[in-house]
Amino acid sequence: MSKVIEVKDLCKTYVVNKKQNNVLKNVNFSIEEGEMVAIMGPSGSGKSTLLYTVSGMDKMTSGEVTFNEKKLSKLNDDQMAEVRLDEMGFIFQQMYMMKNLSILDNIILPAVKSKKNTESRKDTEIRGRKMMKKLGIEDTADNDINEVSGGQLQRACICRSMINNPKVIFADEPTGALNRTSSDEVMNELVGLNNEGTTVMLVTHDVKVAAKCMRTIYIVDGNIQGEYDFGTRATSEDIRMRERSLSNWLMEMGW
Amino acid sequence: MFLRILKKDLTRKKTMNIILLIFVILSAMFASSSINNMISVYGGIDYFCDKAGMSDYVVISRNSDGMNPSDDIIKNAGSITEYRKEDTIYYASNNLLKNGETYCEFENAGIITCIDNVKLNYFNRDNEVITEVQEGHVYVGGLLADPDKTTIGDRITIKYDDVELEVVIDGYIKDALFGSPFLQNARILMNAADYDKLACEDDIQYSNGGAIYYIFTDDLKALKGDMSSLPNALFAKEKSVLRMTYMLDMLTAGLLLVVSICLILIAFTMLSFTIKFTLTEDFREIGVMKAVGLKNKQIRGLYMVKYLFISLIGAVIGYFASIPFGKLLLASVSDTMVLGNDDQVFIGIISSLAVVFIILAFCYSCTRSIKKLSPIDAVRNGETGERHHRRSSLRLSKSPFESNFFLALNDVVSKPRQYVSMVITFTVCILLIAMLANAANTLTSDNLIFLFGTTESDVYYNSTEKIMEIMGCGDENRVDEMIDEIEETLKENNMPGEAHIELMYLLPVEFGDTRMQVQMQQCKTTKTTDYVYNEGVAPLYENEIAFTPQIMEQLGASIGDKVIMEVNGERREFIITATFISFNQLGECGRVHQDLPLKSNELASAFGFQIDFDDHPDAEEIDNRIEKLKTIFDTTKIYNTAEFVDTSTSSSSTITMAKNMVIIIALIIAALITVLMERSFISNEVNEIALMKAIGFKNRSITAQHTLRFVVVVIISGILAGLLVLPFTKLVCDRIFGVMGAISGIVYDIHPLEIFLIYPLILMCGVIIAAYLTSLLTRTIHPDSMGNIE
C-alpha cells in the first residue's frame, strides 16, 4: 500500500492577543491508502486543527503535508480548492448543508462543480440517488435539510463527501451530534466505505467509534503521544474486544 | 445584567450593529434633508416671490414715440391699490459684444435695469439682496445667469449704434421675474451712472425704452379687465402665471421630492429588513434567554434598549450629515431661485427624532416574533421543523444553468422576502431614470411641434433683432418685406422655398362679464386648417376663432359660443369653432383666421421664420442647408424641427440634468444598498461560505454566486421597470406637460435601447461593482471556520 498522507514536522501556531499558542508541535505520521485512522485526544489537544491542517482547510505554520503525492504547502488557494473538491471528502459534526438546496442537490453539488466530472447532470442525479439508496435515505432526496433527522442528514453528508470518489474522507467528530443508534448507522457506513477502499481520517472522542478504525493516533498538547494499531479491520465479532483493548491503551496514555 | 448583555451584544455582533447604525444614519439623513427640502420646494416659489417683493400682476411694456402709453391706464385703473414702475431699456443679443463679436446668442429681448430704480429685490448666488453695483460693472440675470453662456469677470460692450458702454460682469442675479428659463429673457443690472449714459440717448429711449409695472390689487378679475386693452404691452400676467413659469425649476424640485420620498421609503424598507434580519439572526440567543427563564417582555425590553441606543447615535450623526446633503440636493434647483425655510434646524431635529420613533415602532412590531421563538429554537437552528412549503421549486439536478448562476437564482427564489426591498428599490431607480429620459427625449423630438401652434417646416430661423424691428417700426408691410427678403436670399443660394412667420397679438376678449387679454396667434401665409385641433373644426372664416381649453375655462365659454374681441379698436363678434392644445403662454392663447386684419401696434411677439423648401429635401440635406443658412444669415439660431422644439421648451436640458442627477443618486443608493445587503448576507452565511470552501468551491465561485444574486435582482427589477415604464411615464409626465400647457395628446418619444437596455445596464454595472467588491470579503472566511461555528 502507498502512503496517501504523509505529515512531516507539522507545526501550527495561533497568535492570540500577541501570545503565541503552539497548537501542533512537530507532528509526524502517515496514512496508507485504504486505512481508517482515528485521531483522539483530550479537548483542546489539537485534534481538529490537525485534521483541518492535514486536509489543507487550514494553513500550516511550518512542516509539510504530502497528500496523494502533492505537497499542500506548494498549492495556491485555487489548486487547494480543486484538491478538496476532487480528492477529498468532508464530514462535519454539525452536518452543515446549503439551506436553500434539497438533500439531493446538496449531495450532487460537488459533482456539478467538479471539472473532472464529465457525466451529464441527469447521470449525476442518478448516481446521487443510488448513493442515497445505498445509505438508506433515498426517500429524503427532495426534502429540505430541516425535514430530516440528524442521522439521515449525516448520512446525506457522507453521500456528499463520496460523490466525487475522493481518495480520503476527513471526518470531524461525525457522530458527535448523533444518538447512539444514528451514530452506529453512520459509523457502519463509514466502515463500509473504508472496506471498499476509501481512506478515512476521523477525529473522535468516542472509543466505540475509534475501535472501528484500523489505527488510533493519540494527541496531547499538539504532540502525538502514541499510536494504537489494530493491524486489521474491525469485524462484528471482535469489536467488543477492540473497544476494551483501545480503552485500556487510552487509559495508559492518560485519557 | 441587562447592560452587560447589551454591551456584549453591541461588541460581539459588531458587523450587524454597524450595518444597522449605517441604515439609521441614512434614514435620519434622508428624512431630515428631504423633509426640509420638501418644505423649501413646496413653498419655494411663494418664498422666492415674497423675498423678492413680487406684485400681484406684472406688465412689461415698450415705449412708443419715447413715451409709455400704458402709464395713463395704469394710473387711472380703479382696481389697482398700488403700483411700482421700473424703467428699462431693451436690447437684443447683437447689442452685447465682446471683442467686436456677439457675446452670446439668445432668443428674446433682454432688459437693462438701473440698481437705483429697482422695484424688486434681486439676489446674488449667496441669496443676499444686491443693493449696489459699481460703475463699469454689471450683474446679469435670467438667461445670462448661465455659466455656459457667460463668465463672471468677462468685459463686454453694450452697443446701440454709436453708443458704446464697456462693463465687467460682476456676478449672477436671482431674478424673480425673469428667473425661469421659460420666459427666455435676460436682465442686466447696472449702476445709475452707466444706465443714464444709455437712457439719455433719445434714439435708445425712442426705440428701446420701456417699463415694467409691478401692480398690486385686491380684485384680480377687475384688474385683468382694466388691463385688457393696454397698448404696447409685451407681457401682462398675474403672479400665478409667473409662478407657472418656474414650472421647470419646480420640475427639478419636484423630482427632488420624488427622489427624497424614495430615499425615505428605501431607507425605512431597508431598516425594517435589517431589524427583522438581525432578530432572525438572534433566534439562538432568544431561545437560550427563554430557556434560562427570561420573560418575553424582558427580552423585548433588551432589544428595545439596544435599538434605542443605536437609533439615538444614528439620528444624531444623520442629522448633522443631513445639513450638507440637503444643500447638495437643493443646489441643483437653487441657482435661479432663493429657496429655503426658516425652521430648518427645528425640522431637522424633529425629523431625526421621528426616525428614532419609527425605528422603535419597527422594533416593537418586529420583536413580536420573539413570542413565537421557543427554547427549542436554540437547539434547532431556528427551524421549527413544522414548515411544509418548499423553499424553492428549482432543482440543481434538473436545472440547465451553470452551478454558480443556479445557486444565485435559487437563493433569490428561496428567500424572496429578503430580496423584495432590493427589487423595489432598483425598480424605482430604473423607473425614475427612464421616465426622465422619456420626457427629455420627447422634448427633443419633433413629436411636439404641433404644441407650439405652428405647422411643421423644414427650417426654423429665430431672430430677435428682426422681431424687435417688426414690433418697433410701426410699418404694416415690414413683415411681408422681410419674408420676401428671406425668400429672395434662399433663391439666390439655390435653395428656393417659402417663408412664413407666426405673429402673436395681445387682444382684449370678452365673454359675458369676463374680460381678459389673450395672446392670439396668426400666420398670414398658412391656413387655420393646417393646424392641429383637439376638438371642433378649424376657424374657416374671418369671424371664427379657436382657443386653448385653459382660455375656454377662464372665459367660461364652449365651442359655438360667441366672444367679443377688440380688433384695431373695433369690437367684433367671433364664434369659437375649436380648441387646441399649446405650450405657448403656458397654454393660454388662441388662433384667429389668416384673413383677419391685425395691426402691428398690437403685436406682442412672434415666433421665428419658418422655411419650407420647394424641393422637399431629406433630413440630411435639410441639416446641410441649415449649416449654409447659418453662414448666410450670420446666426446660430437656425434649427430643424427637433432642435426648434428643444430650444423653444428650453426644458430638455433641465430634465436631462435632472435625469443625470437621478442616475447618480440612483447609482449611489443602489451601490449603498448592495454593499449593506451583501455585508448582511455574508455575515449571515459564514457557515455556508465556509462549507462551500471546505467542499472545494474556489473563492471566485463564491464571489460569482454572491454577485450573481444581485444581477438576478437587477434583471427582475429591469423586467418590472420595463413593464411599468410606459404607464409610469404617462402618469408623471402627462402632469408635467399639462402644467406646461399641453393637457393631452402627447406622444412620447421612447428610445427602446436607451430605456430598456442602457439605463438598466448602467444600474446593473453599479450594482455588480458594489456587490463584487463587497463579496471579496468572503475571501476572509476560511474553510476551517466550519469547526468554529456553534
Image (spheres, coloured by chain):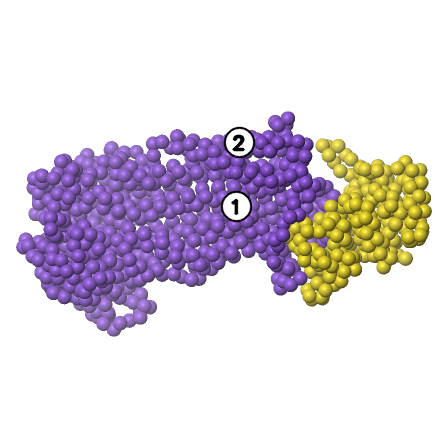
Q: Residue at x 78, y 35 (%)?
A: A21
Label annotation for residue B578: none
Residue B745 as seen in the image, left or right of residue A243: left
Among the chains pictured, the one given yellow colouring is A
The correct choice, above or below, for B350 with respect to B242 in the image is above
The residue located at (62%, 33%) in the rendering is B9
Q: Earlier in the sequence, mark 2 or mark 1?
A: 2
For badge 2, the amino acid type reads: Leu
Q: Residue at x 76, y 48 (%)?
A: A92
Badge 2: residue crowd in 10 Å (few <14, some 14–19, many ≥20): some
Name above or below for residue B721 compared with residue B620.
above
Is A117 positioned to the left or the right of B452 in the image?
Answer: right
**Residue B478 image-quadrant placement:** bottom left
Residue nearer the viewer, B749 or B158: B749
Return the mark for residue B308. Answer: 2
Horizontal side, residue A249 vs residue B81: left or right: right
In the image, A163 versus B383, the foreground residue is: B383
Residue B494 image position (x, y, % from top left): 23, 71
Residue A214 position, x and y percent, is: 90, 50
* Mark 2 belongs to chain: B
Q: Which of B158/B568 is in front?
A: B568
Q: Which chain is purple?
A: B
Q: Which mark is residue B673?
A: 1
When the figure is inspected, residue B413 is found, relative to residue B780, above or below; the finding is below
Chain label for disc 1: B
Disc 1 residue crowd, few under 14, some 14–19, many 20+, Cα 10 Å: many
Helix, strand or loop at disc 2? helix
Q: Residue at x 33, y 61 (%)?
A: B747
At label 1, which amino acid type do we have?
Ile
